[in-house]
Image (tube, helix red, strand yellow):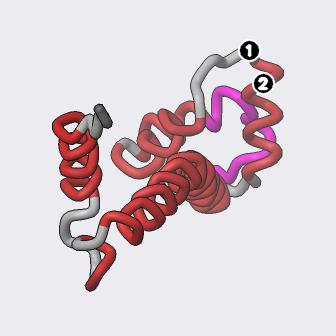
Amino acid sequence: MRVTSSVPSRKRRRRLLERAKGYYGASSKRIRTAYDVVDKAGQNAYIGRKQKKRQYRRLWTVRINTACRELGTTYSAFISALAKAGSRLNRKVLADMAVRDMDAFKALVQSVSPAKTKAG
């Protein structure tokens, strides 16, 4: 007697089609096409999670650099001085401080490298 495993295979296919719901055309209806697009979507999601981290770090760097230049120093000089001072603040916190609390950021820049900043 041939065993078809119809209940588990139908369940597996239904799960896959649920993941493909909303895709264009046959991609959301036909099982063979859905396998391909769901696999590709998973690959793109994995890549996107890595890219997101890079993009945020670039954004934080730009924000810190802009705030530093307003205070008369550069990003690289500020980060270098911060590292020499032994500060453990990361770029995310520094960028948030530069955007939301410029007075605190200004005080931090002046405490780390007082000779290189503008007076005003």
Q: Amino acid at mark 1?
A: Gly
Is residue 120 visible from the viewing direction of this image? no
Say few, some or many: other residues with alpha carbon within 10 Å of mark 1 (under 14 / 14 to 19 / 20 or more).
few
Query: According to the image, label 2 marks what residue?
Result: 83
Residue contact at pointers 2 and 1, CB within 8 angstroms: yes
Q: Main secondary structure of the magenta part?
A: helix
Q: Position of residue 43 (x, y in %)?
A: 54, 54
Query: What residue sits 74% from the left and 14% below the top?
Result: 86
**The quarter of the displayed image where residue 37 is located:** bottom left
Task: Please state the extent of the stretch shown in magenta in the rendering.
Answer: 109-119
Q: Is residue 95 above or below residue 34?
A: above
Query: What residue sits 41% from the left and 51% below the top?
Result: 99
Question: Which type of secondary structure does the marked residue at label 1 adopt?
Answer: loop
Q: Is residue 37 magenta?
A: no
Report the number of numbered marks.
Answer: 2
Q: CA distance from mark 2 to mark 1?
A: 5 Å
Q: Quadrant of the N terminus?
A: top left
Residue 86's label in the rendered image is: 1
